[in-house]
Image (cartoon, rainbow, N blue to C red):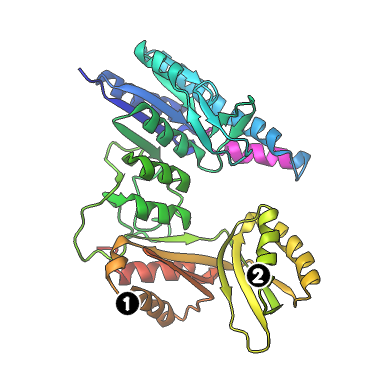
Amino acid sequence: MHRRLIIQKFGGSSVANVERIQNVAKRITSYKKKNCDLVVVVSALGDTTDELIELSQKITTDPSERELDMLLATGEQISVALLAMAIHKLGFEAISFTGAQGGIITDTSHTRARIIQINAQKIKEELQKGRIVIVAGFQGITSNHDITTLGRGGSDLTAVALAKELGADECEIYTDVKGVYTTDPRIEPKAKKLNAITYDEMLEMASLGAQVMQARSIEVAKKFNVPIHVRSSFSPQSGTMIIKEAKRMEDVLISGITINKHETKITICDVPDKPGVAAKIFKKLSDSGISVDMIVQNVSHTRKTDISFTVNKSTSGKAMKVLTQVARKLRTGEVLEDLDIARISIVGVGMKSHPGVAAKMFEILANNKINIKMISTSDISISCIIEKRFTETAVTQLHKSFGLSR
């Protein structure tokens, strides 16, 4: 008889304190009672990762990335051991592993490593002994035995990759919300939980600022067709399924609205309008490890042009330093930084077949006297950069006008 194998991932808020760890242990063992095999992936307790980063900043603002990984990987080691103890106390057998012991082999890019392969032999052996296997999320090891971490939200990636490697029947991602919503319920109380959403929509929402899941984990799920169930660790209700195709009515244009307040808009004024200049600017940024997002170049009437783009707030200081030097070399005008922006995006597979969605979005913003600073589009999303103070209004009005509250 086939025993169901379920991968469960619990985020930091689900294991923030002893009481919550015990609650998670009860939930896991309730599945064991139904005769399921379980591999559980856990994040660090509560805000541990942020606290460890803060601690490192007190020593140096520029820590070696190898040592930072060494430090950050300790967070999950605490939570896996405590969860194993909580399961033992309930009378069930469990064993905890670090990412390395779980066979998660990564490349050598510290703080943002990519999983190369998983050698899951040890996990399989423990499952055969009837144990619940608990694996530290967010971390792995290089072929050279260096500890690495997988970047923000990396525990999602650990869970999805293990689900693929072990051929799991289901991959459940437990979080502090009941699933994926049409927008952030803290901003718009009328936000609705979606029963299902496609990989493409979720990937777009995650990369545009939705905090529910790490974008890289969705990429892996889509590539290997791993269905994901996002649900609340504080409620027995089912959540949102992330799958290849979601069955919906024809008229559903928009699935969700995302907000990202962690970006900075940088403008380089009076750039000489000739071939190769933009390449030099963006190559310098790329060499410094700075990712650039939206880019807008104005039409030049004077042989000079302005180039604006957005970067993550955490890298804006570094970007300004690099660009000030580049500007001097290329003899451009000044480099301006705008920290007071937010990106608002609408996402939906239905957009592909419906013209006029962009026009409607711009009209709604205009009617609410919200100026658009930049625009970018994809097949299934439209993003606008607006002033941060208008974020709440923009979300509420778009949510209402596109009928997402229904």
Q: Badge 1: how crowded within 10 Å, few (<14), some, or many (20+)?
A: few
In which quarter of the view is residue 141 placed?
top right
Q: Is residue 275 visible?
A: yes
Give the image location of residue 189, x and y in percent. 36, 59
Q: Disc 2 marks which residue?
A: 278
The mark found on residue 356 in the picture is 1
- Residue at the far bottom: name it: 301
Residue type (three-letter) at the residue carrying disc 1: Gly
Q: Nearer the viewer, residue 397 or 18?
A: 397
Q: Is residue 137 visible?
A: no
Q: Nearer the viewer, residue 379 or 75?
A: 379
Quarter of the image that includes the N terminus: top left
**Left or right: 121 as drawn, with respect to 399:** right
Disc 2 is placed on an element classified as helix
Where 201 falls versus 403 (above or below)? above
In which quarter of the view is residue 272 placed?
bottom right
- Residue at the far front: name it: 275
- Magenta-drawn segment: 44-57
Numbered circles on residues, count: 2
Q: Badge 2: how crowded within 10 Å, few (<14), some, or many (20+)?
A: some
Q: CA distance from mark 1 to mark 2?
A: 32 Å
In which quarter of the view is residue 237 placed?
top left
* 139 within the magenta span: no
Quarter of the image that includes the C terminus: bottom left
Residue at screen point 41% across, 45% down = 218
Residue at screen point 21% across, 57% down = 248
Q: Nearer the viewer, residue 393 or 294?
A: 294
Where 211 falls versus 20 (above or below)? below
Give the image location of residue 360, x and y in percent. 35, 77
Main secondary structure found in the magenta portion: helix
